[in-house]
Image (tube, rainbow, N blue to C red):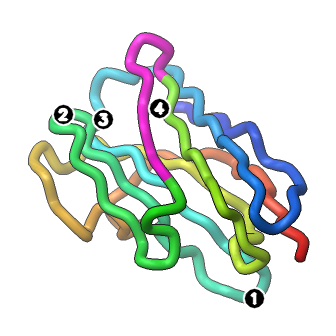
Amino acid sequence: QVQLVESGGGSVQAGGSLRLSCAASGVTDEYYYIGWFRQAPGKEREGVAGLHTRSGNTHYADSVKGRFTISQDNAKNTAYLQMNSLRPEDTAIYYCATSPIYYTWIGPRALSSTVYDSWGQGTQVTVSS
């Protein structure tokens, strides 16, 4: 089982940037996907970005494409979500997650929460206009 801890959330004005971090511990050599998800008040959790750790392939939600970048630092067992040009509608709790299930690239399914079995506690991001 992988333990995940997010950090880097906070409050920022529209147009600003934040970088979220996701530190992994435990059995970290057995997951193939890292995902970032978010949940705004009154809304369902949605996939934002997914990364296939073996190939480096990524997939993004249309709402963040070109603004957010998912990456990983294997040496530090840490994943990141760089968020630029933030908008008020990006306000949400952001979660990272990992999955050991799919060895190969699954494309857009990398944004499906059903793929992932380990989750962090989340970090709040608030974007003001």
Give the image quarter of residue 5: top right
Would residue 70 be counted in the magenta stretch?
A: yes
Mark seen at residue 42: 1
Give the SS element for disc 2. loop
Disc number lying in front (1 or 4) = 1
Report, in whole angstroms, how far the alpha carbon at label 4 lies from the one at label 2. 17 Å
Mark seen at residue 60: none
Placement of 38 over or under 17, stated as above or below: below
**Would you name the residue on which mark 4 appears?**
2
Q: Amino acid at mark 4?
A: Val
Rendered-image quadrant of the N terminus? top left
Q: Amino acid at mark 1?
A: Gly
x and y, in percent, of residue 124 in the image: 80, 56
Labelled pair 4, 3 in contact (Cβ < 8 Å)? yes
Labelled pair 4, 2 in contact (Cβ < 8 Å)? no
Rendered-image quadrant of the C terminus? bottom right
Report, in whole angstroms, how far the alpha carbon at label 4 lies from the one at label 3. 8 Å
Report, in whole angstroms, how far the alpha carbon at label 2 lies from the one at label 3. 9 Å
Would residue 14 be counted in the magenta stretch?
A: no
**Would you name the residue on which mark 3 appears?**
31
Q: Which residues are magenta?
A: 69-77
